């Protein structure tokens, strides 16, 4: 729409020079206004700067891979106006860049193609192309990324005849194999059922029949070629129709041995592998290929398939591409077909002792068993006494120390679209509720006194529990949970808080979550929390006797010394309340001025590396967009699919 106006504007300028005056219609005026808006959006959100003078290069709004427009489809339109020198299509962007061999050809495209309609492959609807001139298009040669360590792909591992036999051998109506009907794919299990409720297998309940005979030759070939060391005894068959996928995940360490192999039949697919440091690799799995995951790629990297009908792939005829590079001169869309994967695993009979404890459930369980235990019966009493009551009493003093918003939380809020509806769950004194005036924000907190402070600042906030928020399901574009989840005393309650947070999100909505990190020194840099240390005292312990908790060694939580490294994941952190900030109605004599109630103890569960991300992976219909460390906190941005 914008470039259409631009073309019209250029036409009128030329007509004026030829002393032929034309009247601008209402429709043309409308298009010119839209052009200004599109140019502003391209500059503000994408950094694409357009120019008013003709050049050989143009940006094509709506003509991108992100709109479901393919390379050959777009070239067919562009070549009507001249010879195309290059077509650059950035991945997942709603625009592309075309460069013609001459300025005259570019002007021809600018004037005649603006407003041209084209079909979107993925959205199955018409979209309109709009053109604007740019001075130049910068191209950088990008080499394909390396495969994750331990990942092997073998092309044409099975023949076409074997493929047909395996596909026909799966009797989806059979009772021998356990079958499931999942939301995003059709699934069948052989040997052992993989239970999606706990992401594990019942090792004492094998399925009748074992592995099917039509897979024997394939498994034997893997063993003979040294691709695997263990003979598989569990098989999961997944069938994906176009538009279906599977969320990013790591196969449970305690459930299966090292090597996991998967054969792609019926169609190729792009699978995404992601490292905890946010680096990701798009891997093409060709039809009839074998994927082997072992070592780091099996234990540390997540793998998943984005649900969509088209994949962004390399436009390389007859070339087997294993990783999708960022070379934007070669990218295009390819329609997915029905893909059936055969994934073979060996059930593990002992605890996993891999080199990646941060994401290993076996090693995390061992760590939990050696950590201080909190009685389940006393969990709510613990939180009431050492979280709820504390913040109620220290609200005024606490608020006076919480006035500067954290920069990366601000960045998240300012990138949300104008008019977005945002909930801050555990908003405290409301320091984030007024950051972006273009958002509709509402807060809630367990502390009535903190909510009253929000009211004094003219913010909308209510008193509620983060485990039971009184807002309608799917009613928010975004949610915040800043320094809240770490106050819940069990993993089950922390997971419930995350589930409640994501319940509030609409489809496509995003949430930002911050929790205190066990690692207060990260990448050889101390957090601000440690840098402000003035003393270094020994850690004490405090027996928790409230709410039915027994005063024994299992319920004795360590009292943390402020501004020092954490020595335990479950602990009490002191808050030294100034006399002028004591709760209303509290009277103390001079003798009591420095007594016990001058110091409050707040319960915390500090998170280790990978723990928050692992907890988020247990949520349904959630994609982790980003996981990072920020000044002593582990942080996750997730999206509801």
Image (cartoon, rainbow, N blue to C red):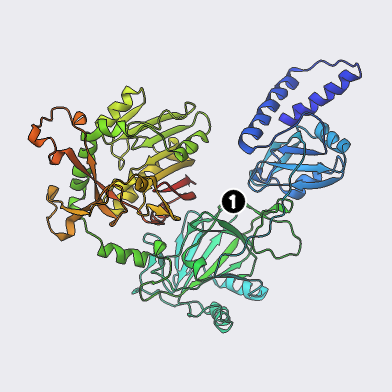
Residue 318 image point, x, y percent? 75, 64
Q: Quadrant of the N terminus?
A: top right
Q: Residues within 10 Å of mark 1 (few under 14, many from 20)?
A: some
User: Can you identify the residue that label 1 sits on?
Assistant: 308
Question: Measured along the vertical axis of the image, is residue 315 above or below residue 357?
Answer: above
Q: Horizontally, is 178 left or right of 373 in the view?
A: right
Q: In this orientation, which residue lies closer to the viewer: 54 or 285?
A: 54
Q: Image quadrant of residue 43?
A: top right
Asked if residue 1 shows in the view, the reply is: no
Residue 192 image point, x, y percent? 41, 72
Q: Image quadrant of residue 566?
A: bottom left
Question: Measured along the vertical axis of the image, is residue 305 above or below residue 351?
Answer: above
Residue sticking out furthest to the right: 18
Residue 199 image point, x, y percent? 40, 62
Q: Image quadrant of residue 146?
A: bottom right
Q: In this orientation, which residue lies closer to the viewer: 502 or 122?
A: 502
Residue 585 image point, x, y percent? 13, 27
């Amino acid at each position: 729409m914008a470039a259409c106006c631009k073309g019209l504007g250029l036409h009128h300028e030329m007509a004026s020079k030829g002393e032929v005056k034309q009247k601008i219609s209402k429709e043309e005026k409308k298009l010119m206004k839209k052009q200004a808006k599109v140019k502003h959006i391209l500059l503000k959100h994408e950094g694409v700067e357009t120019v008013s003078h003709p050049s050989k290069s143009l940006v094509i709004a709506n003509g991108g891979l992100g709109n479901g427009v393919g390379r050959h489809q777009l070239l067919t339109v562009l070549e009507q106006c001249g010879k195309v020198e290059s077509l650059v299509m950035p991945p997942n962007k709603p625009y592309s860049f075309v460069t013609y061999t001459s300025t005259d050809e570019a002007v021809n495209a600018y004037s005649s193609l603006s407003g041209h309609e084209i079909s979107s492959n993925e959205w199955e609807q018409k979209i309109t192309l709009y053109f604007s001139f740019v001075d130049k298009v910068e191209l950088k040669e990008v080499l394909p990324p390396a495969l994750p360590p331990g990942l092997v792909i073998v092309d044409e591992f099975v023949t076409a005849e074997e493929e047909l036999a395996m596909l026909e051998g799966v009797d989806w109506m059979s009772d021998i194999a356990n079958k499931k009907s999942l939301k995003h794919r059709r699934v069948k299990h052989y040997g052992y059922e993989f239970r999606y409720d706990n992401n594990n297998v019942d090792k004492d309940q094998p399925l009748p029949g074992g592995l099917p005979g039509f897979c024997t030759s394939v498994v034997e070939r893997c063993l003979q070629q040294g691709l695997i060391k263990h003979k598989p005894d569990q098989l999961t068959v997944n069938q994906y129709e176009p538009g279906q996928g599977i969320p990013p995940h790591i196969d449970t360490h305690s459930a299966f041995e090292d090597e996991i192999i998967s054969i792609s039949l019926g169609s190729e697919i792009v699978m995404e592998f992601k490292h905890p440091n946010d680096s990701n690799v798009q891997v093409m799995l060709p039809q009839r290929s074998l994927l082997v995951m072992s070592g780091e790629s099996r234990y540390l990297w997540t793998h998943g398939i984005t649900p969509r009908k088209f994949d962004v792939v390399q436009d390389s005829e007859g070339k087997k591409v294993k990783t999708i590079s960022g070379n934007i001169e070669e990218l295009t869309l390819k329609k997915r077909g029905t893909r059936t994967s055969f994934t073979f695993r060996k059930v593990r009979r002992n605890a996993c002792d891999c080199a990646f404890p941060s994401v290993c459930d076996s090693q995390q369980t061992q760590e939990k068993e050696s950590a201080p235990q909190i009685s389940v019966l006393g969990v709510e009493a613990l939180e009431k006494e050492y979280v709820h009551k504390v913040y109620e009493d220290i609200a005024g003093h606490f608020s006076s120390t919480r006035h500067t918003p954290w920069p990366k939380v601000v960045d998240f809020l300012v990138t949300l679209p104008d008019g977005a509806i945002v909930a801050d769950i555990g908003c405290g004194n409301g320091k984030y509720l007024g950051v972006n005036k273009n958002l509709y924000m509402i807060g809630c907190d367990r502390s009535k006194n903190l909510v009253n402070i929000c009211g004094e600042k003219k913010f909308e906030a209510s008193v509620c529990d983060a485990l039971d928020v009184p807002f309608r399901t799917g009613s928010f574009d975004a949610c915040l949970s800043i320094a809240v989840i770490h106050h819940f005393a069990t993993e089950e309650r922390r997971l419930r808080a995350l589930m409640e947070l994501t319940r509030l999100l609409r489809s496509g909505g995003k949430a930002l979550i911050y929790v205190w990190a066990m690692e207060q020194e990260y990448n050889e840099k101390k957090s601000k929390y440690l840098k402000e240390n003035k003393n270094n005292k020994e850690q004490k312990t405090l027996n928790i006797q409230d709410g039915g908790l027994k005063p024994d060694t299992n319920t004795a939580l360590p009292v943390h010394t402020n501004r020092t490294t954490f020595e335990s994941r479950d602990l009490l952190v002191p808050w030294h309340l100034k006399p002028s900030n004591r709760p209303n109605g509290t009277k103390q004599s001079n003798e009591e001025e420095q007594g016990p109630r001058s110091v409050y103890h707040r319960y915390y569960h500090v998170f280790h590396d990978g723990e928050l991300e692992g907890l988020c992976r247990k949520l349904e219909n959630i994609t982790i967009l980003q996981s990072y460390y920020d000044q002593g906190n582990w942080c996750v941005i997730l999206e509801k699919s």
